[in-house]
Amino acid sequence: GHAIAYDSARGVTVLFGGYDHISGSSGFRSDTWEWDGVDWTMRSTASPSARAWHVMAYDDARGVVVLFGGGTYYAGIYGDTWEWDGTTWTLRSTTGPSPRVSHAMVYDSIRRVSVLFGGGTDTDNPAQSIRNSETWEWDGLTWTLRSVDGPSSREGHAMAFDTARGVTVLFGGRGGPVAQFDVKSDTWEWNGTSWALRSDGIPCARGGHSMAYHGAIQRTILFSGYSNYGYLVDTWQWDGNIWRLRSGTGPSQRSGSSMAYDVARDTTVLFGGFANGPDGETWELSELAVCDT
């Protein structure tokens, strides 16, 4: 339920918030941490309020991490926009997308906007969550609703921005409005104007997975999540045409982990997740092999 984003100006992966699934209402976090490739350092415990199931993306044109939404069991869900400049969190907006959880957001470095899609309205009972199919963009000053067409209403999906092809890639998620396990296997791409369905059926349907774009090999990496049959432990690469299963060992099965690509060190950072309990592991995928078979 946490979120991470890579700050390329300072060379650190930023983490905010989350939920430990054990401590009840006291398990929601409001702490900010940064990973430099060796150690995690706590940077702040002030603002935004404690939450999980929010999203973050790094705006490299303005040098800030953008955070939107999320919620808790006891205080409901949020529709606020915050920015972290490496020292201070600043509340930037309370208007724009409606309050939501389990949405996805990436930064489009070509159009210089943060792209947000989907999300739901219930933190306690996913089967009662009302999901949406909205696409919003944040330019640093204003949120703009760009589309309600494209992928169907969902939450628990994941997105990554493909810098080589200039598109936002979306995969999977949990559909709705009231189908807790209606998980999806579709791949969509947003070019800044419209969504296009690119693939369906591979990888297998899932939600709660994580994705990041690996710039060195120009592939979107997808890891894990949950299906109708339990937690998954597979790693995939998307080259814009085909998904390929990536062999090798790695993190254990889980959902709810977060990934970000560390440009300076050419490695994909993965943190946390949940299967039999909360997981505080940090993993890195640094091998640059491309799956072509």
Image: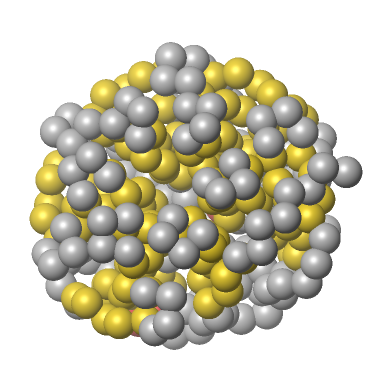
| Location of residue 49 in the rendering, given as x and y in whole percent from the top left corner | 22, 66
Query: Which residue is drawn at the image coordinates 62% and 65% (left, top)?
Result: 285
Q: Position of residue 17 (x, y in %)?
A: 34, 69
- Image quarter of residue 262: bottom left
Front residue of 18 and 171: 171
Q: Is residue 78 left or right of residue 141?
A: right
Nearest the camera: 256 or 123? Answer: 256
Q: Is residue 177 left or right of residue 36?
A: right
Q: Quadrant of residue 8?
A: bottom left
Tell me if residue 75 can be seen: no
**Residue 107 placed where, x, y %?**
37, 40
Query: Farthest residue toward the right?
Result: 293
Residue sitting at x 68%, y 79%: 276
At 15% from the left and 72% from the top, the residue drawn is: 46
- Rendered location of residue 185, percent (x, y): 74, 38
Nearest the eye: 55 or 192: 192
Residue 100 against residue 137 in the figure, above or below:
below
Snapshot colouring: secondary structure
Give the left or right position of residue 102, taking residue 144 as reference.
right
Q: Residue at x 32, y 64 (%)?
A: 11
| Residue 104 in view here | yes
In the rendered image of this protein, does residue 241 appear above or below residue 207?
Answer: above
In which quadrant is the C terminus drawn? top right
